[in-house]
Image (spheres, rainbow, N blue to C red):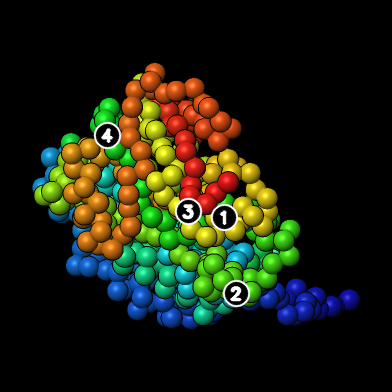
Amino acid sequence: MNSTTPHPEDSRSPGITYADSGVDTAAGDRAVELMKEAVAATHGPQVLDGIGAFAGLVDVSALKSYDRPLLASSTDGVGTKIAIARELDIHDTIGRDLVGMVVDDIIVVGAEPLAMTDYIACGAVVPERIADIVRGIAEGCRLAGCALVGGETAEHPGLMAAEDYDVAGAAVGVVEAGELLGPERVRHGDVVIGLDASGLHSNGYSLVRAVIAAAGLSLESPVADFGRTLGEELLEPTRIYTADLLAVLRDARTLGAVHALSHITGGGLAANLARVMPRGLAARIDRSRWEPGAVFSRVAGWGSVPQLDLEGTLNMGIGMVALVEAETADATLAVLAERGLGARVIGEVVGEDSLPAPSSALEHVVTGAKGVDGGAVLMAGQHAGWA
């Protein structure tokens, strides 16, 4: 008996497309079109090719003038600050946070950032939202003098909710080996200069969000101390110190005066400063020399957060620290002031063996922070207006 067997493709229902699985490549292309102008604005003549290439190319011929160029690299994200951006549906500042968290780690060793790339993972590509994020990254790169040379947007349906996203970035910079900053340059008698933070920056938002939830606060509520809504305060972008600190490192008045820098991120001032203190020396910090912004006292009050826990989580108003020669402290402060950046002497470097025994619960010494076997940091005194 003769019979005709149907071809498998003739009997099955229409197949599942990539779009059916939740990935919209057309939306991704639209996002790229929306961000192209902002990204291109970060490119100088050293950047080759254009957006859409598989790899970003940077002409590093200038490194031929270095005696021994060292490449510095860093990668980071912005943590749960993204939850605030998502709740308020404001996404054009989070990119500046990302750049600040990355490039300001590079400047710590004295390196100038050259190029940055970003990675955005999301549940669904919303072109306008992705473009807003990347525009913020581009603006941060512009402020840092760094080229944004590549990026990736990955759609993860089924793994992330449609409104979810996360961002990460990496950057590379260069420093002359003989100009490398770090603990080995720090000397007894150096002064500690604290540079003003713009706010919470991008650390400790799990604590901050827990406090807000427990206090039943709305992000839309105006807060008199802030002069704006709570949400606007919490979304204040991370200050990017790179260009200001490069100016200090290159100014004739302060050439060679900066011995070490510390980016005050997760872990707070003491833990991060301890990372650049050499063994045998200690930084003695006096809290009375600066007053944290209102957001820090508000978080403390709303959540009854113990001060030491707050200090071990947030930057407390100091986003970067410079250890400089005492003789050039005034000149360093002058350069920063000329650039509109508030800063002040908040302590000095002393022998670790000369530290007094703690005299109160708030006076404490931090050593061995972040796995670094180095010197110590003594936190003493109290901020004005803090009990």
The residue located at (25%, 62%) in the rendering is 339
The image shows residue 103 at horizontal and vertical percentages of 36, 54
Specify few, some or many for label 2: CA neighbours under 10 Å numbering under 14, 14-19, or 20 or more.
some
| Location of mark 4 (residue) | 190
Q: Please identify the quarter of the rendering in which residue 98 is found.
A: bottom left
Looking at the rendered structure, the secondary structure element under dot 3 is loop
The residue located at (32%, 31%) in the rendering is 349
- CB under 8 Å between callouts 4 and 2? no
Residue reaching furthest to the right: 1
| Location of mark 3 (residue) | 292
In the rendered structure, which amino acid carries the disc numbered 2? Answer: Pro
First in sequence, mark 1 or 2: give its number.
Answer: 2
- CB under 8 Å between callouts 3 and 4? no
Looking at the rendered structure, the secondary structure element under dot 1 is helix
- CB under 8 Å between callouts 1 and 3? yes
Looking at the rendered structure, the secondary structure element under dot 4 is loop
- Pick the front one: 336 or 156: 336
| Location of mark 2 (residue) | 222
| Location of mark 1 (residue) | 297
First in sequence, mark 3 or 2: give its number.
Answer: 2
Specify few, some or many for label 1: CA neighbours under 10 Å numbering under 14, 14-19, or 20 or more.
some
Q: Please identify the quarter of the rendering in which residue 356 is found.
A: top left
In the rendered structure, which amino acid carries the disc numbered 4? Answer: Asp
The residue located at (69%, 67%) in the rendering is 217
The residue located at (68%, 71%) in the rendering is 218
The image shows residue 286 at horizontal and vertical percentages of 42, 39
In the rendered structure, which amino acid carries the disc numbered 3? Answer: Pro
